[in-house]
Structure formats: structure tokens, C-alpha cells
Image: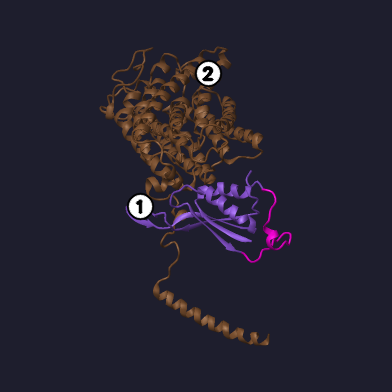
Amino acid sequence: MEPTLEDALANIDTLWVFVAGTLVLFMQAGFLLLEVGFSRMKNAGTVVAKVLANLSIAALCYWAVGFALAFGATKAPAAGETAGWFAGNAGFFLNDLDKLQLPAMSFSKADSAAKFFFQFAFCAVSLAIVWGTTLERIKFGAYLAYAVLFSAVIYPIISHWIFGGGWLQVNFGMQDFAGSTVIHLLGATGALAALLHLGPRLGKYGRDGKPNVIPGHSMPLVGLGVIILLIGWMGFNPGSTLGVADGRFAEVAIVTMIGAAAGGLAAMATIWRVTRSFDIGMTGNGVIAGLVAITAPSGYVEFWAALPIGAIAGVIVVVCVIAIDRKIDDPIGALSSHGAAGIWGTLACGIFTSPRLAELNAVGDGGLLYTGSFGQLGAQALGVVAAFAAVFSVSYLAFWAIKKTIGLRVTEEEEHDGLDIVEHGMWGYPEQFMPIPGSVYQPAASERAARSAEKSRAAAVALRSATPSTQEN
Amino acid sequence: MQKIEAIIRAEALQDVQDALDALGVSGLSVSEVMGCGRQKGYTESYRGSRANISLRPKVKVESVVPDEVVERAVDAIASAAHTGRAGDGRVFVLPVSHAVRISSGERGEDSVRHEQPAGWGH
């Protein structure tokens, strides 16, 4: 049969969804560099092992169970019905992928396999966010245990509520275009639960209870991480169109870029007001916060609205980082840039959503500014509270169980030595810590002999030329 | 006038520095050193191969103090750096024959005497 124009358009959508998924996958490199840069040198290598392990666990769990719970259905629901209010129920191990119904993504003609790939990359990002608070003191085994639970159960079920046609999306019209709540608040909520069980790094709080500064070892790596995340976000938000129709994806990209820019500048200005310095790490946090906040509204707001949404996120992140640091130890500011900014971004839909875009996406209504009604804001707030409460309670129990069984935190001595050597048997930066054979140039025996002959000849010459002047004195 | 050389754990440095400051020690120098003692080395593994590392990283604190301060300074270091485990380090005391403070030209013990704690880092 001749391929039709419709087939060709569907194939273009498939290609875009795959490219966007690949960009989202690239965000793993961004998280890796961000966390390495915000750690001390003795804890740099462990981040590499963790990111690789988590990404692999997320891939297998999301393929086996996660995607089915998040999106799978045996038949398309009728209008006004949810696709299972609590969770999806078909497509385990992607069985019968051709026949699988994905009602929440049926507006896109892209291939189901591409949709799976894109959604898996989202799950992996959310999981990566969990660990930002736990740097430099957590046991490696805890990563593995919680990663399975998170990518197989926690993330898929909550994302079903908001992305997959579950109760928050269908019954309440909660808007979250690309996941300020689903990806970022979820990850940050897991991070908070982990942190409360884990406690601060040794030396973080002095005997007087005041926080000490434990600076990360590489701001260039932090900057590279932020830029890579920014590029990845161009798959994250614009890709959530799941297609190329009308160039909507490019408009979403512009909204995203404006949000990021406003977040970075607002954070820089805010921290300048506080400390009179153009803080490097805080500017990076501001860009991330702007991106996180614009994630939910990116498909629902006009260009101009991205500016206040991003800028307010930039202020929020600075205030939260400073306030949180007084009491609990969050080394990269994940609670502020993903948690607080994620909440703000989700609520921002209730204020700034333009009615024409709500109609285009067929979820919820216009925001407070357009309609004068608090209805949408209420739906957004409900979504935030429901997602936070569900993820926090399950995660708090999970980390408690991990603490009681395999243990959550390394010993004091191990923490001093660093996780690289303790958990992985090797430093991330070996030459910083150990004398390495071969790091000093050792000439071959024959070369050594030739050199020493050359040296004694030169010494003899120097002695001869020096002798007359000694006599003159 | 004596020179105190203390080899200590890196994480004890701030406490040792604060303790010496409280005594009014006029200055100190710190360097990162590698060394071995009663604390065992450790084994590293790298992509399947193993390496035994006998030298561990430590911090060396050096300070020249007037005779009347030596005993108190040594006690202060020994208690600030103490955990009771192998690897806490050692303190050595050496005689110093002469000293000059370059900025003022002061010589001898006066150049290493200091009346008030400087409040390093506070």
C-alpha cells in the first residue's frame, strides 16, 4: 500500500518525540556534572556510578512495570471518563505494544514506542532529582533499593494521576504541561524524605548550631551541568507537545527560554541584595528554578507570562536555599530549585494560563488573570498537595525501612574518607589523593645512564670554568 | 623559642587552629602531607586491579612559639586532635635558634609573641 500523507505526518511526530526523548536523556549528564561540581573531590566518583546505576534501574523498571501503570489501558475511555482513576493496567513489559491503548497520549499520532522512550526519560529525570539532597554521606545500596520502588511504582502512579488520564487530570482539570509537579516536585519530595532520615553532613553545623559552608569543588562543572540541563529542557517542555503540529513546540521552547533567563537573572539580583556578590552557584540554581517553574505552564501560557513566572522562581530559590540551609543540609539546593520552584510553577498555571491554550490542550480552564476565577488555582493547589502527601508518606516509610535494614548512611570514619574510596575502592580524582606509579616520569635504564654521563661532563666543565674566578677572590 | 610540628587528621585542623588562636599563638603554617604510622593503609581497586596504598593524607601544622607557651600549645593540639584511634597523629617540638618578623624587623622571641587572639576565620 502506498504511504499516505497522514503516515508521513505521524512519522514526523514520532521522530520529534524520539529526538526530544534523547534530549531529556542528556539531562542525566547535566545532573551528573551539577552534583559532581557541588560535591567535594573525595565524593566525585560516586556520583558517576550512581547516575549510571539509577538510569539503568529506571530503564528496566519503567519498561517492565512503570509505563503500564502510568499510561496503559486495554480500551479507550469514553468522554469524561478517566483511564483508570488510580493507575493504568496494561502493557507490562510493553506486551502487545501495537494494540496497547494510551488514552492520555492519543492526541499525538507518534508511535507508541517513541512515546514510551520519551516517558521513560522523564521517569529517569525525576529519579535523578531525588538524590541531590543526599550527597556525600548516603550508602550506595540505598540508591538501588529506592530507585526500584520509585521508578516502578511511585513515579508511574503519580504521573498517571496528572499525565496519564487519572483523577487529578480528568476530574479536576489539573494542568501540568511537562511536569513541574510530576517530575520536579515528586523528585524533590523523595529528596526531602531521604534527607530527614539522613541528617546533615559531618561539620555542616557547628557546635553553636550555625551552618558552615562546605563548598563544592568545581563551579565550571556546575555551570556545564546547568547548560546541559537547559539544552535537555528543550526536549523536556517542547517535546511534551508529542508532535510538530503548527510549530507549537517552538513556541513552548521560547516560553521555556524566557523562564530560564528570568530565573537566572532574578536569582543573581536577589543574592546580590543579600551578600553583595554575584554568586555563581546561586545563579545556576536560579536558571534551574526558572526552568522548573516554567515546566508546568510552558504549554499553557503566552510568551510574556514566562517572565514573571521565571523571575519569581529565581527569587523563591534564593530565599528558600538560605532559609533551608539554617536547619537541614541540602548540598545542591534540590529542595528549593525543584521543590519550591515546582510548587510555584504548578500554581502559576492557575494564575497565568491563557484560555485559548487551555482549550487547545483540552485540560482545565484559563487562569485567575484572564477569568477572575480561583477555580483553576484551586485545582493546581489540590494537585500539589495530593502529589506531595502521597509521595512523602510512601517515601518516608521507604527510607525508614532502608535505614532499618541495609542502612542509609555511612559511618563517621567512612564519611571523612569520602564515598569514592569507601564505596567504590577508588577516587574520582586519584592524583589528588594518592601517589600513582607512572605519574612521575621515570626514564628507562639506558636513558638514565646516558643522562648521568652527560650530567657529570657538564659538572666537570662548570667546575673548570669556576676555578679561576675563585682564585681571583 | 620552639617550633611545634604537629601531624594531624585533616578534619581536626579547624579545632587545632581555634585552640592555638585562643592561646595567642602568633601564626602557623599548614601543609598537606602524605605519611604512614600505626594507622593501616588501605586497598584501592580500579577496574578489576588492586593496589595497596600505604600512605594516607594528613595535615602538618607548624608554629614557632615563645618558650612559656610551648607546653600549653602542645596540650591544646593534643586534646583538640584527639579521637583515641590510630591515625590521630603526632606532635614534635624542636628548638629554634633565631627568628625575624619581616614587616617590622623585630628579632628573636618578640617576633613570635602575640598578645591578643587574632580570631582567625571568625
Q: Quadrant of residue A29?
A: top left
Q: For mark 2, what is the residue? A: A350
The C terminus of chain B: image quadrant: top right
The answer, for residue A154, to whether it is visible in the render is yes
Point out residue A138 in the picture as x, y percentages from the top left corner: 42, 38
Residue at x-position 51% and y-position 39%: A226
Question: Which label is found at residue B45?
Answer: 1
Disc 2 and disc 1 in contact, CB within 8 angstroms:
no
Q: Nearer the viewer, residue A376 or A461?
A: A461
Q: Quadrant of residue A445?
A: bottom left
Q: Nearer the viewer, residue A52 or A336?
A: A336
Q: Main secondary structure of the magenta part?
A: loop
* Magenta extent: B96-117
Q: Chain of mark 1?
A: B
Q: Which chain is purple?
A: B
Q: Is B100 part of what is drawn in magenta?
A: yes
Pointer 2: residues within 10 angstroms few (<14), some, or many (20+)? many
Point out residue A206 in the picture as x, y percentages from the top left corner: 55, 39
Indicate the amino acid at tag 2: Gly
Q: Colour of chain A?
A: brown
Color scheme of the displayed model: by chain
Indicate the amino acid at tag 1: Ser
Q: Nearer the viewer, residue A96 or B10?
A: B10
**Element at label 2:** helix
Pointer 1: residues within 10 angstroms few (<14), some, or many (20+)? some
Q: Chain of mark 2?
A: A
**Element at label 1:** strand
Residue at x-position 62% and y-position 35%: A271
Q: How many marks?
A: 2
Point out residue B111 in the picture as x, y percentages from the top left corner: 69, 59
Point out residue B91 in the picture as x, y percentages from the top left corner: 53, 56
Give the spatial CA distance, label 2 vs label 1: 54 Å
